[in-house]
Amino acid sequence: MSDAVDRLEQAEREREQARERVEEVGADRLRTCRDAYRELTRLLDDYDGRATGSGDFQAYTQFEGAVATVVGNLDEDVPEYDTFEAVDDHLQQRRLSESDFERAREMLAPVADLVGRLDDLEAAREAYVQARRDARRRIGTLDDRVAELERLERLGDADLDAPVERLREPIDAYDEAVREAFGAFRGDASARDLLDLIERAGAFPLVEFRSPPAELLTYVHDHEAGTEPLPTLLEYADYSGSKLDHYVEDPAALRSAVATRRTYLRDIDAEPLTVGWPPPPAAELPWLCGEYRSVVAGFADESVVARLREVRALARREEYERLRESALARSELTDEERERVASGAVERDLAAAREERAAIEEALSTHGELGDPP
């Protein structure tokens, strides 16, 4: 049995018990009783010390009048009505002492216990709602676990001897070619052209370049230094102020726009345009290659684009997913995971996770959402 189910069922039992205790008296009658109890205890707290002894006579008369009004407004069918009347009688004296106030509080103790049933019900309802939330969170955790176990089971069934080089060779050839072409572009093109290309790549969600900072783009467009290649700009950024004066018109602008962004500029490389290994699913590969082509064509020659087309064509092969599964298994499965699959441990864990999830769903269906409180 799932702990989440146990907690939900326990919360339901406690909520039902609390609800029955309220219904024994009646929720409306209990609320009326609670309102009177709260008002009397407030009056006792407010006037204790002021309406005692031979002190403030006005406070004394206000206090006795307020108590009489609270009790006088109660119907006789209010729970603990006799207790309220007894408290009123007790306090209607010519002179009150501290002990009279304390005695009144003691007399109201049974009322406190009675109206506490409403608080108990509210607490039980909150605990029940929390138990449902916890059960939903547990389902989310189990969904993740089921997905991971299904992945292990699937990869464990993969053919580790499959000829994955049929996929890897064209992918590696493209990745190497695009890295070489981008490296040449990064070293030779103006920083302006390079950053413009990266900014345009932002229109393609699958090309994960970090967008150039606005101040950097403005600088390379508005200053002559923007026509220099990126490595030159980075070299300038390391110059002292006096040395930089000989190379750029506005050293301060370069330091502000470029020197403060060395890390971003140095990290610019071709990785956002590589396919990588293991490759993506067949359904994703054509989309990925399509977006890559839109960017790659802006700096690489036709030979690189041709290699990218070869990679895209891989997704049409019937063997693609089988080979990809083998590649994933080789790359991602540890020896321990392979042993767990082989021993049946993954299969057992998967069955247990599915069973627990189904039990929680059934419990949530059986013990539904709460309506308005009684």
Image (spheres, helix red, strand yellow):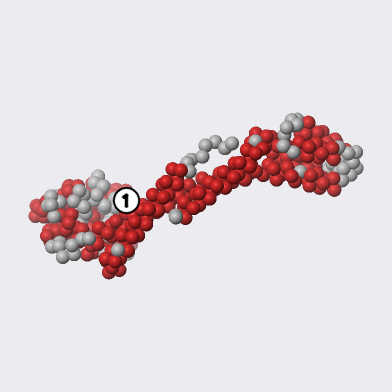
Comparing 39 with 369, the one in front is 369
Position of residue 187 relative to residue 128, above or below, is below
Q: Which residue is mark 1?
A: 213
Horizontal and vertical percent position of residue 59: 83, 38
Amino acid at dot 1: Pro
Horizontal and vertical percent position of residue 110: 74, 44
Position of residue 237 relative to residue 18, above or below, is below
Count the numbered circles shown: 1
Q: Residue at x 70, y 45 (%)?
A: 113
Find residue 262 and report its image quarter: bottom left
User: Can residue 320 be seen here?
Assistant: yes
- For label 1, count other residues whose C-alpha is less than 10 Å away and answer few (under 14), some (14-19) or many (20+): few
Find residue 78 and report its image quarter: top right
From the viewer's perspective, tell me whether residue 224 is left or right of residue 359: left
Q: Residue at x 25, y 45 (%)?
A: 203
Comparing 304 with 287, the one in front is 287
From the viewer's perspective, tell me whether residue 342 is left or right of residue 367: left
User: Can residue 232 be seen here?
Assistant: no
Horizontal and vertical percent position of residue 355: 37, 53
Identify the secondary structure beneath mark 1: loop
